[in-house]
Image (cartoon, helix red, strand yellow):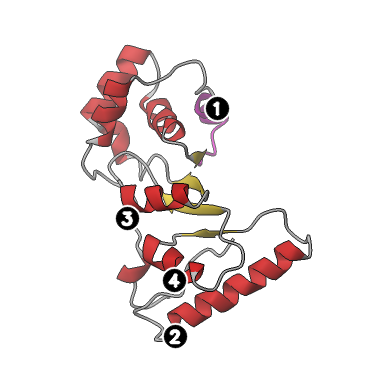
């Protein structure tokens, strides 16, 4: 997985750098060295540029995704290109767990707020990667398939405003270090 695109603000030849890096990924895939290839933190603009030179489009785009972080245009584009979406930080930075809408739905479902967030991402078609170091939370995070969110609940969660997370965009970075 290419973890980060070469950002426009740092490199005048960002498109060439990304294309060259992607060619390396394609070669690994063609030689059966890897089973799938993908990107991380690529916005729609970076994917559109990559599409101009790619022989194989990314199979996965790993992006920050949780209630309050809506990236509908990117999601629609990825789905139109059959790019699997993988959600990292599906619980944001933890502040999302205090959201009243999520707490109300979790109470009604007899589930934790974290389970409701993860289930929302799954129902939106994402592969979800929650991070935990606690065995109890690992077990809790995997118990997502004995309930579903209704269309109304999904709509309520979709409307949650930004309330915590990393909110990282490659175009916002001007230097690494």
Q: Earlier in the sequence, mark 3 or mark 2?
A: 2
Q: Earlier in the sequence, mark 4 or mark 2?
A: 2
Circles 2 and 1 in contact, beta carbons < 8 Å: no
Circles 4 and 2 in contact, beta carbons < 8 Å: no
Q: CA distance from mark 3 to mark 2?
A: 25 Å
Mark 2: give few (<14), some (14-19) or many (20+) Cα within 10 Å. Answer: few
Q: Is residue 67 magenta?
A: no
Q: CA distance from mark 4 to mark 2?
A: 12 Å
With 21 as the anchor, is 90 left or right in this view? left
Residue drawn at point x = 66 percent, y = 54 percent: 36
> In what element is the residue under mark 1?
helix
Q: Earlier in the sequence, mark 1 or mark 4?
A: 4
Residue drawn at point x = 51 percent, y = 75 percent: 18
Residue drawn at point x = 27 percent, y = 35 percent: 158
Circle 2 or circle 1, nearest the eye = 2
Q: CA distance from mark 1 to mark 3?
A: 25 Å
Residue 44 visible in rendering:
yes
Residue range corresponding to the magenta coloring: 130-141
Q: Earlier in the sequence, mark 3 or mark 4?
A: 4
Q: CA distance from mark 3 to mark 4?
A: 22 Å
Residue 142: numbered disc: 1
Residue topped by disc 2:
13
Q: CA distance from mark 1 to mark 4?
A: 36 Å
């Amino acid at each position: 997985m290419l973890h980060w695109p070469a950002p426009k603000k740092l490199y005048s030849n960002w498109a060439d750098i990304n294309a060259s890096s992607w060619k390396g990924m394609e070669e690994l895939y063609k030689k059966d060295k890897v089973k799938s290839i993908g990107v991380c933190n690529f916005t729609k603009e970076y994917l559109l540029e990559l599409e101009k030179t790619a022989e194989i489009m990314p199979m996965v785009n790993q992006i920050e995704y949780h209630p309050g972080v809506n990236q509908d245009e990117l999601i629609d584009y990825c789905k139109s290109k059959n790019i699997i979406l993988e959600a990292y930080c599906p619980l944001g930075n933890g502040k999302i767990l205090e959201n009243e809408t999520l707490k109300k739905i979790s109470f009604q479902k007899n589930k934790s707020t974290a389970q409701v967030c993860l289930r929302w991402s799954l129902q939106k078609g994402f592969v979800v990667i929650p991070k935990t170091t606690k065995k109890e939370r690992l077990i809790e995070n995997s118990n997502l398939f004995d309930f579903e969110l209704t269309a109304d609940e999904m709509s309520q969660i979709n409307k949650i405003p930004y309330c915590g997370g990393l909110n990282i965009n490659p175009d916002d970075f001007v230097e690494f270090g």
